[in-house]
Image (spheres, helix red, strand yellow):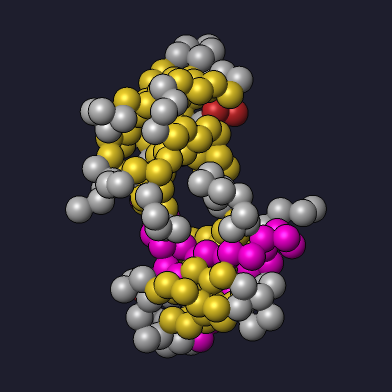
Amino acid sequence: KNQVEQSPQSLIILEGKNCTLQCNYTVSPFSNLRWYKQDTGRGPVSLTIMTFSENTKSNGRYTATLDADTKQSSLHITASQLSDSASYICVVRQGGYNKLIFGAGTRLAVHP
Amino acid sequence: DTGVSQNPRHKITKRGQNVTFRCDPISEHNRLYWYRQTLGQGPEFLTYFQNEAQLEKSRLLSDRFSAERPKGSFSTLEIQRTEQGDSAMYLCASSDSLDGSYNEQFFGPGTRLTVL
Protein backbone atom coordinates (compact mmCIF):
# COMPACT_ATOMS: atom_id res chain seq x y z
CA LYS A 1 0.00 0.00 0.00
CA ASN A 2 1.30 3.45 -0.91
CA GLN A 3 1.76 5.40 2.31
CA VAL A 4 3.62 8.37 3.70
CA GLU A 5 4.37 8.42 7.43
CA GLN A 6 5.74 11.37 9.34
CA SER A 7 7.30 11.76 12.74
CA PRO A 8 7.01 13.23 15.21
CA GLN A 9 3.31 14.01 15.21
CA SER A 10 3.98 17.24 17.04
CA LEU A 11 7.01 19.15 18.26
CA ILE A 12 7.62 22.14 20.50
CA ILE A 13 10.91 24.01 20.30
CA LEU A 14 12.27 27.32 21.52
CA GLU A 15 12.85 30.18 19.14
CA GLY A 16 16.33 30.05 17.64
CA LYS A 17 16.72 26.29 18.01
CA ASN A 18 17.05 23.81 15.15
CA CYS A 19 14.79 20.84 14.49
CA THR A 20 14.46 17.91 12.10
CA LEU A 21 11.25 16.37 10.86
CA GLN A 22 11.13 12.86 9.39
CA CYS A 23 9.21 11.30 6.52
CA ASN A 24 9.15 7.62 5.49
CA TYR A 25 7.30 6.50 2.39
CA THR A 26 6.37 3.27 0.66
CA VAL A 27 5.18 4.84 -2.60
CA SER A 28 6.19 3.03 -5.75
CA PRO A 29 7.12 3.94 -8.37
CA PHE A 30 8.52 7.17 -6.99
CA SER A 31 8.35 10.43 -8.93
CA ASN A 32 9.13 13.25 -6.53
CA LEU A 33 8.79 14.32 -2.91
CA ARG A 34 7.73 17.70 -1.63
CA TRP A 35 7.64 19.31 1.77
CA TYR A 36 4.75 21.69 2.29
CA LYS A 37 4.19 24.22 5.06
CA GLN A 38 0.59 24.73 6.13
CA ASP A 39 -0.31 27.58 8.43
CA THR A 40 -3.43 27.14 10.53
CA GLY A 41 -6.55 27.71 8.42
CA ARG A 42 -4.58 28.09 5.19
CA GLY A 43 -3.74 25.89 2.22
CA PRO A 44 -0.34 24.14 1.99
CA VAL A 45 2.57 26.01 0.38
CA SER A 46 5.46 24.14 -1.23
CA LEU A 47 8.89 24.51 0.44
CA THR A 48 11.05 22.09 -1.55
CA ILE A 49 10.76 19.43 -4.21
CA MET A 50 13.18 16.57 -4.71
CA THR A 51 13.41 14.00 -7.46
CA PHE A 52 15.04 10.57 -7.33
CA SER A 53 18.53 11.85 -8.10
CA GLU A 54 18.59 14.68 -5.57
CA ASN A 55 19.94 14.15 -2.07
CA THR A 56 19.73 17.62 -0.58
CA LYS A 57 17.88 20.81 -1.38
CA SER A 58 17.78 24.04 0.56
CA ASN A 59 15.30 26.90 0.68
CA GLY A 60 16.57 29.55 3.07
CA ARG A 61 16.52 28.08 6.58
CA TYR A 62 14.85 24.90 5.34
CA THR A 63 16.98 21.98 4.14
CA ALA A 64 15.43 18.78 2.85
CA THR A 65 17.25 15.50 2.35
CA LEU A 66 16.20 12.42 0.43
CA ASP A 67 17.48 8.86 0.61
CA ALA A 68 15.73 7.05 -2.20
CA ASP A 69 17.26 3.71 -1.21
CA THR A 70 15.77 3.71 2.28
CA LYS A 71 12.76 5.79 1.17
CA GLN A 72 13.32 8.40 3.82
CA SER A 73 13.32 12.17 3.77
CA SER A 74 13.95 14.78 6.39
CA LEU A 75 13.29 18.50 6.71
CA HIS A 76 15.76 20.45 8.83
CA ILE A 77 14.82 23.91 10.07
CA THR A 78 17.67 26.10 11.22
CA ALA A 79 17.43 28.97 13.71
CA SER A 80 13.68 28.62 14.11
CA GLN A 81 11.41 31.65 14.19
CA LEU A 82 7.96 32.12 15.66
CA SER A 83 6.58 32.24 12.12
CA ASP A 84 7.79 28.68 11.55
CA SER A 85 4.90 27.48 13.75
CA ALA A 86 2.80 25.46 11.32
CA SER A 87 2.15 21.94 10.08
CA TYR A 88 4.79 20.48 7.78
CA ILE A 89 3.47 17.91 5.35
CA CYS A 90 5.52 15.43 3.34
CA VAL A 91 3.95 14.62 -0.03
CA VAL A 92 5.03 11.97 -2.51
CA ARG A 93 3.98 11.86 -6.15
CA GLN A 94 3.62 8.37 -7.53
CA GLY A 95 5.31 7.90 -10.88
CA GLY A 96 2.92 7.77 -13.82
CA TYR A 97 0.00 9.12 -11.78
CA ASN A 98 -1.22 12.62 -11.24
CA LYS A 99 -2.21 12.04 -7.64
CA LEU A 100 -0.29 13.12 -4.56
CA ILE A 101 0.01 10.98 -1.44
CA PHE A 102 0.11 13.09 1.71
CA GLY A 103 1.52 12.38 5.11
CA ALA A 104 -0.47 13.43 8.18
CA GLY A 105 1.99 16.20 8.92
CA THR A 106 4.12 17.29 11.86
CA ARG A 107 2.68 20.14 13.87
CA LEU A 108 5.54 22.42 14.93
CA ALA A 109 5.16 25.05 17.63
CA VAL A 110 7.98 27.54 18.14
CA HIS A 111 7.84 29.26 21.51
CA PRO A 112 9.63 32.48 22.49
CA ASP B 1 -3.99 38.23 -6.59
CA THR B 2 -3.22 35.50 -9.14
CA GLY B 3 -3.34 32.54 -6.75
CA VAL B 4 -6.05 29.93 -6.24
CA SER B 5 -9.11 31.38 -4.56
CA GLN B 6 -11.94 29.60 -2.77
CA ASN B 7 -15.33 30.79 -1.58
CA PRO B 8 -16.71 30.85 0.96
CA ARG B 9 -13.85 30.56 3.43
CA HIS B 10 -16.16 29.29 6.15
CA LYS B 11 -19.55 27.60 6.00
CA ILE B 12 -21.72 26.50 8.88
CA THR B 13 -24.77 24.46 8.00
CA LYS B 14 -27.30 22.18 9.61
CA ARG B 15 -27.30 18.47 8.98
CA GLY B 16 -29.33 17.59 5.92
CA GLN B 17 -28.77 20.86 4.09
CA ASN B 18 -26.96 21.15 0.76
CA VAL B 19 -23.81 23.25 0.39
CA THR B 20 -21.79 24.40 -2.62
CA PHE B 21 -18.20 25.59 -2.68
CA ARG B 22 -16.41 27.40 -5.47
CA CYS B 23 -12.79 27.28 -6.57
CA ASP B 24 -11.10 29.64 -9.02
CA PRO B 25 -7.76 28.19 -10.13
CA ILE B 26 -4.71 30.04 -11.42
CA SER B 27 -5.88 31.23 -14.82
CA GLU B 28 -3.41 29.38 -17.03
CA HIS B 29 -3.71 26.08 -15.16
CA ASN B 30 -5.70 23.35 -16.88
CA ARG B 31 -5.77 20.89 -13.99
CA LEU B 32 -7.89 21.32 -10.89
CA TYR B 33 -8.07 19.13 -7.79
CA TRP B 34 -10.33 18.87 -4.76
CA TYR B 35 -9.11 17.54 -1.42
CA ARG B 36 -10.64 17.07 2.01
CA GLN B 37 -8.62 17.61 5.16
CA THR B 38 -9.74 16.72 8.67
CA LEU B 39 -8.06 17.99 11.81
CA GLY B 40 -4.58 16.63 12.34
CA GLN B 41 -4.50 14.82 9.00
CA GLY B 42 -3.03 15.51 5.60
CA PRO B 43 -5.31 16.31 2.66
CA GLU B 44 -7.15 13.37 1.06
CA PHE B 45 -7.74 13.35 -2.67
CA LEU B 46 -11.36 13.67 -3.78
CA THR B 47 -11.37 14.36 -7.52
CA TYR B 48 -9.44 15.90 -10.38
CA PHE B 49 -10.26 17.70 -13.63
CA GLN B 50 -8.25 18.31 -16.73
CA ASN B 51 -9.97 21.22 -18.43
CA GLU B 52 -13.69 20.41 -18.12
CA ALA B 53 -13.27 16.63 -17.96
CA GLN B 54 -13.46 14.94 -14.56
CA LEU B 55 -10.76 12.30 -14.95
CA GLU B 56 -10.66 10.67 -11.54
CA LYS B 57 -12.84 10.36 -8.46
CA SER B 58 -11.86 8.92 -5.11
CA ARG B 59 -13.96 6.33 -3.32
CA LEU B 60 -14.29 9.06 -0.67
CA LEU B 61 -16.54 10.94 -3.09
CA SER B 62 -19.88 9.40 -2.20
CA ASP B 63 -23.09 9.86 -4.17
CA ARG B 64 -23.85 12.93 -2.08
CA PHE B 65 -20.80 14.70 -3.51
CA SER B 66 -20.65 16.14 -7.00
CA ALA B 67 -18.04 18.33 -8.64
CA GLU B 68 -18.21 20.25 -11.89
CA ARG B 69 -15.93 22.38 -13.99
CA PRO B 70 -18.29 23.36 -16.81
CA LYS B 71 -16.08 25.68 -18.83
CA GLY B 72 -12.70 24.39 -17.77
CA SER B 73 -12.11 27.38 -15.52
CA PHE B 74 -13.74 27.58 -12.07
CA SER B 75 -15.08 24.51 -10.32
CA THR B 76 -17.86 23.84 -7.83
CA LEU B 77 -18.11 21.10 -5.23
CA GLU B 78 -21.60 20.36 -3.95
CA ILE B 79 -22.46 18.23 -0.95
CA GLN B 80 -26.08 17.15 -0.66
CA ARG B 81 -27.80 16.14 2.58
CA THR B 82 -24.76 17.05 4.66
CA GLU B 83 -23.76 14.86 7.60
CA GLN B 84 -21.69 15.75 10.64
CA GLY B 85 -18.89 13.58 9.25
CA ASP B 86 -18.61 15.98 6.31
CA SER B 87 -17.16 18.63 8.62
CA ALA B 88 -13.68 19.30 7.29
CA MET B 89 -11.52 21.73 5.35
CA TYR B 90 -12.10 21.41 1.61
CA LEU B 91 -9.02 22.38 -0.37
CA CYS B 92 -8.75 23.15 -4.05
CA ALA B 93 -5.49 23.07 -6.00
CA SER B 94 -4.50 23.72 -9.59
CA SER B 95 -1.55 22.82 -11.78
CA ASP B 96 -0.25 23.14 -15.31
CA SER B 97 -0.03 19.86 -17.21
CA LEU B 98 2.88 21.28 -19.21
CA ASP B 99 4.94 21.64 -16.02
CA GLY B 100 6.72 18.35 -16.68
CA SER B 101 7.46 15.88 -13.92
CA TYR B 102 7.29 18.53 -11.22
CA ASN B 103 3.62 19.33 -11.90
CA GLU B 104 3.41 21.49 -8.80
CA GLN B 105 -0.05 21.86 -7.35
CA PHE B 106 -0.84 25.28 -5.92
CA PHE B 107 -3.37 25.23 -3.14
CA GLY B 108 -6.12 27.66 -2.27
CA PRO B 109 -6.87 28.77 1.31
CA GLY B 110 -9.65 26.20 1.69
CA THR B 111 -13.28 26.27 2.75
CA ARG B 112 -13.91 25.13 6.31
CA LEU B 113 -17.26 23.35 6.59
CA THR B 114 -18.95 22.79 9.92
CA VAL B 115 -22.08 20.65 9.96
CA LEU B 116 -24.16 21.05 13.12
| Image: A28 above or below A8 | below
Residue A20 image-quadrant placement: top left
Residue A84 image-quadrant placement: top right
Q: Residue at x 31, y 73 (%)?
A: B59
Looking at the picture, how far across and down is residue A108, in whole percent? 43, 31
Q: Is residue A52 visible?
A: yes
Q: Residue at x 53, y 60 (%)?
A: B91
Q: Residue at x 69, y 72 (%)?
A: B73
Q: Magenta includes B41?
A: yes
Q: Is residue A104 visible?
A: no
Residue A71 image-quadrant placement: top left
Which residue ends up furthest to the right in the rendered image?
A: B1
Looking at the picture, how far across and down is residue A25, in whole percent? 28, 39
Numbered range of the magenta stretch: B18-47
Q: State left or right for residue B49 relative to residue B28.
A: left
Looking at the picture, how far across and down is residue A65, in whole percent? 41, 23
| Image: A23 above or below B3 | above
Q: Residue at x 57, y 65 (%)?
A: B32
Looking at the picture, how far across and down is residue B39, in whole percent? 39, 53
Q: Magenta includes A30?
A: no
Q: State left or right for residue B81 relative to residue B27.
A: left
Q: Give the quarter of the figure containing the C terminus of chain B.
A: bottom left
